[in-house]
Amino acid sequence: MKQVLLPLLLLLTSPVWAGDLKLSLHGEGIRGKTLFVAVHNSANDFPTRDGNAIKASAIAQSDLVELTIPNIPSGEYAVAVFADMNGNGKLDSNFIGIPKEPVGISRDAKGSFGPPKFVDAAFKIGDGVTALKIELK
């Protein structure tokens, strides 16, 4: 019995690996604007409902922003970013839901007749640093 419990206990107490996510965010005209980042681990919330997402923000000092989000548990994620051009703290869209402000999605995922799908934007984070480049358009 002890031979079975010991390996099981070691598995249960093993550390959860975490890594850092290093983002290079680029967009013309974003200098001085706040960038809002949401790192999603669920297709159910991606890309618009960010209540369960890991969130970060940064004020762009130029058209290129380097942002590192530390200690993200290992797993599959997708990132959604927008530049708040008018300073109201939210992503503005037109009457049919198309964003009026620059947005970017991991893996440059594109949606057809709606937002991109999680599976198209997803990438893995493990131990160490995961680097992504995201273009805001």
Image: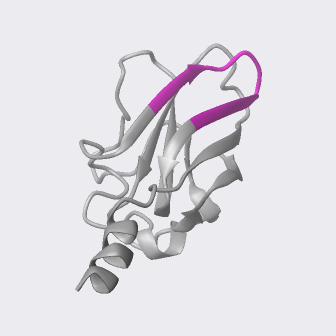
Of 76 and 111, nearer the camera is 76
Q: How many marks?
A: 0
Q: Is residue 83 above or below residue 107?
A: above
Res 129 visible = yes
Q: Is residue 21 left or right of residue 121?
A: right
- Residue 4 picture location, percent across and down: 30, 85
- Quadrant (top left, top right, bottom left, bottom right) of the N terminus: bottom left
Residue at screen point 42% across, 69% down: 118
Residue at screen point 76% across, 28% down: 63
Of 80 and 66, nearer the camera is 66
Residue at screen point 63% across, 64% down: 107
Residue at screen point 62% across, 56% down: 127
Query: What colouring does the structure picture have?
Result: one colour
Question: Magenta segment range?
Answer: 56-69
Q: Is residue 31 left or right of residue 54?
A: right
- Residue 3 picture location, percent across and down: 33, 84
Residue lying at the far front of the rendered structure:
2
Of 20 and 92, nearer the camera is 20
Q: Is residue 78 above or below residue 111?
A: above
Of 39 and 112, nearer the camera is 39
Q: Considering the whole magenta stretch, tell me its main secondary structure.
A: strand
Q: Is residue 131 magenta?
A: no
- Residue 93 picture location, percent across and down: 35, 41
Res 117 visible = no
Residue 9 picture quarter: bottom left
Q: Is residue 17 above or below residue 123?
A: above
- Residue 128 picture location, percent across and down: 68, 52
